Amino acid sequence: MLLTYAVMIFAIAALGGLVLASFVLRGRLAPWVISVGHALLGASGLALLIVAVLQGDTPARATAALALLVLAALGGFYLASIHLRGKVAPKAVVFVHAGVAVVGFLTLLSAMLAT
């Protein structure tokens, strides 16, 4: 059940990520409210996933998804630090962050469907 909630939260966070990426692709800073909402949703999804993995009744893919999503979160912290300086993030960094997050999300989705 926790995996299902985590997938739903990450899916909503991904929508915010698409909006954020659209700003970067146009060379503009995104509104802070979207950035903070994206971060809070990502952190909430990670918290649920950590609890689910620590409970031990999840497929190994859930642990792999957790590792990937933690890497994506680290990239997100870096992107937020750029945003805090009032600069638009490099597109390549945004694409790497998004790519790792998507692979992590799909890995988590496959783990959820396996249960």
Image (cartoon, helix red, strand yellow):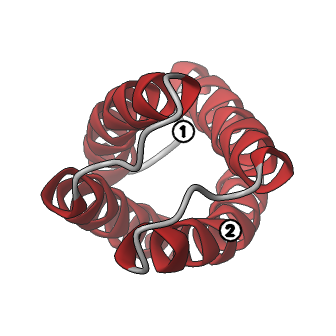
Where is residue 29 drawn, in percent x and y? 57, 55
Please determine whether, in this image, residue 8 is positioned above or below residue 88: below
Give residue 74's quadrant in the image: top left
**Alpha carbons under labels 2 and 1: distance apart:** 30 Å
Please determine whether, in this image, residue 68 is positioned above or below residue 111: above
Give residue 6's quadrant in the image: bottom right
* Observer able to see residue 60: yes
Circle 1 is placed at which residue position? 57
Could you tell me the amino acid type at mark 2? Gly
Where is residue 111 drawn, in percent x and y? 42, 64
Q: How would you rate the neighbour count of disc 2 (Cα within 10 Å): few for under 14, some for 14-19, many for 20 or more?
A: some
Q: Nearer the viewer, residue 82 or 57?
A: 82
Mark positioned earlier in the residue sequence (2 or 1)? 2
Q: Residue at x 45, y 22 (%)?
A: 81
Please determine whether, in this image, residue 10 is positioned above or below residue 59: below
Q: Looking at the image, do the residues carrying marks 2 and 1 touch, with CB atoms under 8 Å apart?
A: no
Could you tell me the amino acid type at mark 1? Asp
* Observer able to see residue 115: no
Q: Nearer the viewer, residue 63 or 9?
A: 9
Q: Residue at x 36, y 58 (%)?
A: 101
Please determine whether, in this image, residue 52 is positioned above or below residue 105: above
Q: Residue at x 44, y 25 (%)?
A: 77
Image check: 93 left or right of 63?
Answer: left
Secondary structure at badge 1 equals: loop
Q: Nearer the viewer, residue 92 or 59?
A: 92
Q: Residue at x 77, y 37 (%)?
A: 40
Circle 2 is placed at which residue position? 16
Image check: 18 left or right of 8?
Answer: left
Secondary structure at badge 2 equals: helix
